[in-house]
Amino acid sequence: MKKVVIGMSGGVDSSVAALLLRDQGYEVIGLFMRNWDSSINNDYLGNPNLENSICPQEEDYNDAKSVCDKLGIPLYRVDFVKEYWDYVFTYFLDELKKGRTPNPDVMCNKYIKFDLFIREALKLGADYIATGHYARIKDGKLFRAVDLNKDQSYFLAYVSKEKFSNVLFPIGELEKPMVRKIALENGLVTAKKKDSTGICFIGERNFTKFLENYLPNQSGDIIDIDTKEKVGEHIGLMYYTIGQRRGLHLGGHHEKSYVALKDLEHNILYVASGDENRYLYSNRAIIEEFNFLTDERPEKCTCKFRYRSHDVEIQVKYLENGDLELTYDRAKAVTPGQFCCLYQGDLCLGGGIIKEVF
């Protein structure tokens, strides 16, 4: 009997994934990861859970334990608090300092879930590792999930391709309503549990207050990029991302305005008025540190410039320094620091970090 170690998060997706694996005849072992400690990590400002009698991670562990007991499988736990800080959260803060928009979920998959977790699973004798991600693996290649609304291949595209050789995604062929239905029919306590949101393994926070725990903020002017007039004040460039509309507090500035540019040297936030403002759009981008998941190097394919964006048809030029140059007709709010993922149909070709936008 093949042994599978599955990452149990305390959510419905990993719960059903474990159930399916058990029913398929695998020997299933649950492994719960603890990656954040609010006390150690000075997570006080912006934390809505300080008055709770039990922290959310312990609630998640208890739910995971309840599911594993119900399924008759063992559950172990492992502590990656220091490693998460070193490999994921430090990157997150460093990118914000540079005025870029980081994606900690991508780095969490690369360094925690599909590196450190795999090492722990192998110690437990795993033949395979599994998670509750919405994605599919075929012949060692990463594909989008059947449920495109929940597909998480975008967040997995920075994982080294060899790590997928013994990975199982049991719910990749299912749509979310079916996952919840299976959980309900089998009496799992996570069946109606709300999906986790916010920063990977940290959760929901008042983002502005949360960052004050770690980075000093410096207010400055908000300038209309067309008129060059001051239209407001920002509370710190790190709190804003390209294309952002909400939270600008521009008062009498009536037309829709979006963040168009961050000038770190002069601490100025530039905004552009109107949905079709030329400063919000680009037709070329440079992608750095690209992680190839296949041997394919197509000159034409599609890409996602952010998780919830539509696919954009692109032409790809592979530069001598390893960067990729993407050209496309028109895309809005392509943001340095964010993650770009390339696709050929449902096949994920890999992903990299947006370096420059033109």
Image (tube, grey):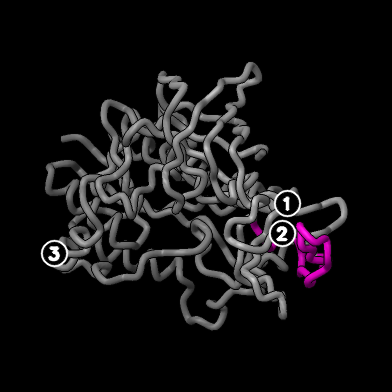
Residue 167 x %, y %: 32, 36
| Side (left or right) of 4 relative to 161 | left
Q: For this rendering, which residue is in front, 148 or 293?
A: 148
The alpha-carbon separation of the residues under discs 1 and 2 comes to 6 Å
- The residue lying at 56 percent from left, 20 percent from top is 318
Asked if 33 appears above or below 285 in the picture, the reply is below
Residue 245 x %, y %: 61, 66
At mark 3, the secondary structure is loop
As shown in the figure, which amino acid type bears the numbered disc 1?
Gly
The alpha-carbon separation of the residues under discs 1 and 3 comes to 47 Å
Mark 2 lies on residue: 238
Q: Which residues are magenta?
A: 218-241
> Residue 186 — which label?
3
Which of marks 2 and 1 precedes in the sequence? 1
- The residue lying at 80 percent from left, 52 percent from top is 263
As shown in the figure, which amino acid type bears the numbered disc 2?
Met
Answer yes or no: do the residues labelled 1 and 2 have beta carbons within 8 Å?
A: yes
Asked if 177 appears above or below 110 in the picture, the reply is below
Answer yes or no: do the residues labelled 2 and 3 have beta carbons within 8 Å?
A: no
The alpha-carbon separation of the residues under discs 2 and 3 comes to 45 Å
Residue 271 x %, y %: 71, 61
- The residue lying at 54 percent from left, 45 percent from top is 331
Mark 2 Cα within 10 Å, few/some/many (few <14, many 20+)? many
